[in-house]
Image (cartoon, rainbow, N blue to C red):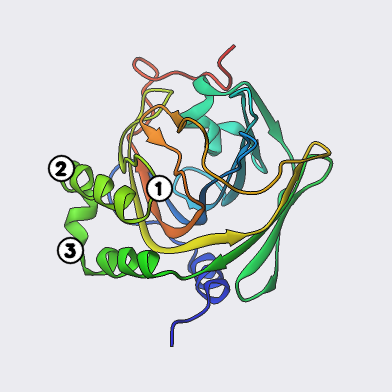
Amino acid sequence: MDREPRDQVLDAERAAGVPDGPGERFAGWGVMGLPFRSGHYLALRHFTSSIGPAFRSVWHRDPAGRWTMYSDTEPRHACIRYFGARLDRVETAPIGVDWDGPRSFTVTIPGHVHWRVELAATLTTRLMTWTGGALPERLWHSDRALRLLAPLAGTVLSAGRLRLSGTAPNGQTFRAGPRRLWGVVGGRAVVDGADVGPPGRLARQDRLGDFWLPQRGLLAIGDASFEPFDPARHSVATTAG
């Protein structure tokens, strides 16, 4: 019998390591993304990092397409380091994740976000998890292999266009390795006091640089890497303004 997502996520947190290799490296888990019919979008990251302390980050897109990133550590040690040039607002705030069952948890940012997530393994997430486990490790570090895998994953998962390698808004190249997957099959969210409504595909899929936001709710355990920051080529922007 498959182990529950809560147990595997907590194991990933306890492992608290990052993959070997060059660049700025991260390992952990998160909700790759969850679209809502209203035009809102939410994502979550919980990563151990080679460049600073472990951190959590919540990404929020409003129906007008404006992006906010919340982080529980300073921006230069979190996702904002790579995506800031595309953001409209950043906030540093405590981010709580509380599991109330083997397949459900709540994300809380006091005064901003209350988001309940319900998970399930589906035929397609099981297939992609099996595929990820069967791939030789070297292919997870090959841009060519990731360019081939991403469209296949997007089609199989009904998640729209996906890319597992490319360039982030601040200019750094990236590779993403989602090794184990579950579907987000339920839950609700309140953002800044407003209920964002039921999950559902965006009218138009959004992206942050070359990172396309899935059109289906997915939770992943895996890793990611970015090229080292170079002030001559990469932006230090924390917002688009």
For this rendering, which residue is in front, 223 or 123? 123
Residue 36, disc: none
Residue 176 in percent (x, y) is at 35, 47
Name which quarter of the figure residue 111 lies in: top right
Who comes first in sequence, dot 2 or dot 3? 3
Q: Residue at x 35, y 33 (%)?
A: 228
Please determine whether, in this image, residue 204 is positioned above or below residue 234. Answer: below
Q: Residue at x 24, y 53 (%)?
A: 140
Labels 2 & 1 near each other (Cβ < 8 A): no
**Residue 16 at what x, y percent from top left?**
50, 63
Residue 136's tag is 3
Return the residue at label 2: 144
Instruction: Give the distance between the C-alpha atoms of the residues marked 2 and 1, in whole angstroms.
Output: 21 Å
- Which residue matches tag 1? 159
Decide which of tag 2 and tag 1 comes sooner along the chain. Answer: 2
Q: Quadrant of the C terminus?
A: top right
Crowd tier of the residue under label 2, counting other residues whose Cα lies within 10 Å: few below 14, some 14–19, many 20 or above: few
Q: Say which of 70 and 17 sits in front.
A: 70
Residue 227 coordinates in the image, percent (x, y)? 32, 34
Say which of marks 1 and 3 sits in front: 1
| Of the image marks 1 and 3, the number of the one nearer the N terminus | 3
Residue at the spot 34% in from the left edge and 39% down from the top edge: 161
